[in-house]
Image: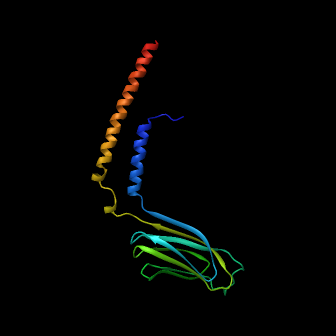
Amino acid sequence: MYKGNKMKGAGVGILMCLLLQLQLPYRAVVGLSITVNELECVYENVEYEGDNVSGNFVVVDHEIFWSSDHPGIDLVVTAPAGNVVYNLKGSSGDKFQFRAPRSGMYKFCFHNSFSAPETISFYIHVGHIPSEHDLAKDEHLDPINVRIAELREALDSVSAEQRYLKARDARHRH
């Protein structure tokens, strides 16, 4: 059973939501499986220049066991301007990480030069660490702090009234 003041919990909950919205970094996460016959591309939007883009891929379904002459899978990541920001050749899976040189749509292309299609499990994470000027300043929180103080006073008043009524009730029962 819940015991406590609902108004206090609601005020704290609202404040926490606001603070989390203001201070948590933006995060986009994409995970999927694709079958690569020859060339397959996936697009991911990066909202801010300098965001950290990381992820991994692994070939999860081999039609045949790879021999030493299997060419592997190539991954080429292209920035919105068309320049290559990441390039990996002939792999059965790997991790990648780079800082986005600019915001915009990034293209992740997998190339399979082997005749058998390969299924790839692919994961992308775009992380944004806000700079100091992106964070809320004390003056932005002043109206919230005023409202919290008002709610605290109202809560104290209600609590005092409750104690008074309980004491009166106890006195009249005895």
Q: How many marks?
A: 0
Query: In the image, residue 83 lies at what x, y percent?
Result: 44, 83
Residue 67 relative to residue 29: left or right: right
Residue sitting at x 46%, y 71%: 45
Location of residue 115 (image quadrant):
bottom right
Depth check, front residue: 100 or 7: 7
Query: In the image, residue 114 lies at what x, y percent?
Result: 65, 85
Query: In the image, residue 21 lies at what x, y percent?
Result: 40, 55
Residue sitting at x 34%, y 42%: 148
Residue sitting at x 40%, y 42%: 11
Tell which residue pokes out farthest to the bottom in this image: 69
* Relative height, residue 66 to residue 124 (above, below): below
In the rendered image, the quadrant that contains the N terminus is: top right
Query: In the image, residue 85 lies at what x, y percent?
Result: 46, 80
Location of residue 101 (image quadrant):
bottom left
Applied colour scheme: rainbow
* Relative height, residue 172 to residue 70 (above, below): above
